[in-house]
Image (cartoon, rainbow, N blue to C red):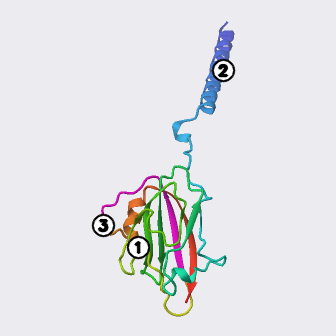
Amino acid sequence: MFYPYKTKNSSNTRLLVMVLVLFIFTTTSCKKKEDDVTPTTTTTTDFTLTSGSVSTDGALSVDHTCDGAGTSPQLSWANAPEGTACYAITMHHIPGPGDEHVYMVVYNIPVATTSLASGETSIGSWGVNTVNEQAAYTPPCSQGTGTKEYILTVHALSACPTISSSKVTKAELETAIKDITLGTTTKTITYTK
């Protein structure tokens, strides 16, 4: 009489353990924890920058340097990340370690704008270049022989930055947009004097 009671109790225990395991498996596999949810990203790798002022081999037209008319280059960009509300553009050159020449700083470009014509000055807010510290494009003046590289960057922003400085530098712009940049696209261009 004692033996069947023990066997019946063992069967009940095994059944209870199986039900408990099945319950745990079902609840953990069917329901995701909040921590397990992967956040979606809004950045796209298709964000591109092109320029009609640059040849197929990447050379900047002389018109946009101090050897020519010195007007800003034509720029077009496409496929900005989802959520873009504003754009900013910079153009710079690094002649050596710890040195940077800035030729163009433009920000608060409306989201509906996806290009700038050559010589455009009425779209967005213009920051200062490092050549003459004017709030305008200044053309590269390649010194010496050899090919020099210049970097054009378009920043897609989730909001237009608020900057209190009256003469916004590239560094100040980059600080202001650090936390609102959704994506960037760059184009390295060259000029040989």
Horizontal side of 109 relative to 19 (left or right) equals left
Pick the quarter of the image with the N terminus: top right
Residue at (37, 70) in percent of width and height:
169
Percent from the top left, x then y, of residue 168?
Answer: 35, 68
Residue 152 vs residue 8, the one in the foreground: 152
Assign a secondary structure to mark 1: loop
Q: To which quarter of the image does residue 74 belong?
A: bottom right
Q: Is residue 118 left or right of residue 125?
A: right
What residue is shown with label 2? 14
Decide: few, some or many residues near mark 3? Use Cα within 10 Å; few <14, some 14-19, many ≥20.
few
Circle 3 SS class:
loop
Vertical arrangement, residue 30 with respect to residue 161, above or below: above
Front in this rendered view, residue 107 or 124: 124
The quarter of the image holding the C terminus is bottom right
Q: Nearer the viewer, mark 2 or mark 1?
A: 1
Range of magenta residues: 149-165
Residue under the image location 48 percent in, 81 percent down: 70
Q: Amino acid at mark 1?
A: Ala
Q: Which of the marked residues, 2 or 1, is nearer the chain's N terminus? A: 2
Label 1: how many residues lie within 10 Å, few (<14), some (14-19) or many (20+)?
many
**Disc 2 packing (10 Å; few <14; some 14–19; many ≥20):** few
Give the alpha-carbon distance from disc 3 to disc 2, as whole Å. Answer: 77 Å
Residue 67 circle label: none
**Residue closer to the observer: 61 or 49:** 61
Identify the disc placed on residue 166: 3
Q: Position of residue 85 (x, y in %)?
A: 48, 52
**In screen coordinates, is 63 left or right of 4?**
left
Tag of residue 136: 1
